Amino acid sequence: MNTKKITEITGVVKDTLRYYEKIGLITPPARSDNGYRIYDKIHLKELKFIKMAQSVGFTLATIKLAVPKLSSPDPSCPVLKKTIKDQIEAIEEKIQELNQAKATLTSWLEINTR
């Protein structure tokens, strides 16, 4: 598929695709005879993973460590395991902070509506 098609499917803009390619975050796409990039299913998988990982707080540097594992997962990879565990802890801490903020706002609301 061409650049336009993959950007429509993934929502990742052309400049971002090229940046990801430049920094080695995605597999370099094949090129057509006229030099256009040709993306395939592995690129879709990589881009969906990148978007998901960013949505839960992973940095591009951390994601770059994990992307190669998509095609040949190594569940025993200690660096990846530690990174995932650390991110889970960070998410749990954020949830606690948000729950505390919610409780505070709820109590303020109750006080101010009496």
Image: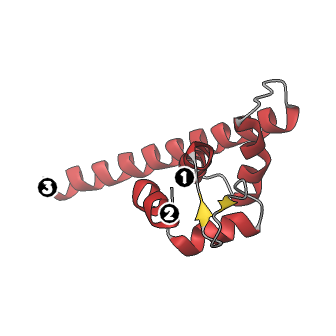
First-in-chain label (3 vs 1): 1
Q: Are marks 2 and 3 in contact (CB under 8 Å)?
A: no
**What amino acid is labelled 3 in the image?**
Thr
**Place of residue 9 in the rendered image (x, y in percent of width and height, measured from the top left):** 42, 54
Farthest residue, direction front: 33
Inter-mark Cα distance, 2 to 3: 45 Å
Inter-mark Cα distance, 3 to 1: 41 Å
**What amino acid is labelled 2 in the image?**
Val
Q: Nearer the viewer, residue 63 or 11?
A: 11
First-in-chain label (2 vs 1): 2
- The structure residue drawn at horizontal position 45% and vertical position 66%, both measured from the top left corner, is 4
**Place of residue 11 in the rendered image (x, y in percent of width and height, measured from the top left):** 44, 60
Q: Place residue 32 in its image quadrant.
A: bottom right
Viewed as shown, does residue 87 lie left or right of 114?
A: right
Which disc number belongs to residue 12? 2
Q: Place residue 88 in its image quadrant.
A: top right
The residue to which callout 1 is attached is 51
Q: Are marks 2 and 1 in contact (CB under 8 Å)?
A: yes
- The structure residue drawn at horizontal position 44% and vertical position 60%, both measured from the top left corner, is 5
Q: Is residue 26 above or below residue 90?
A: below
The residue to which callout 3 is attached is 113
* Mark 2 closeness class: few <14, some 14–19, many ≥20 residues within 10 Å: some
Tally the marks. Answer: 3
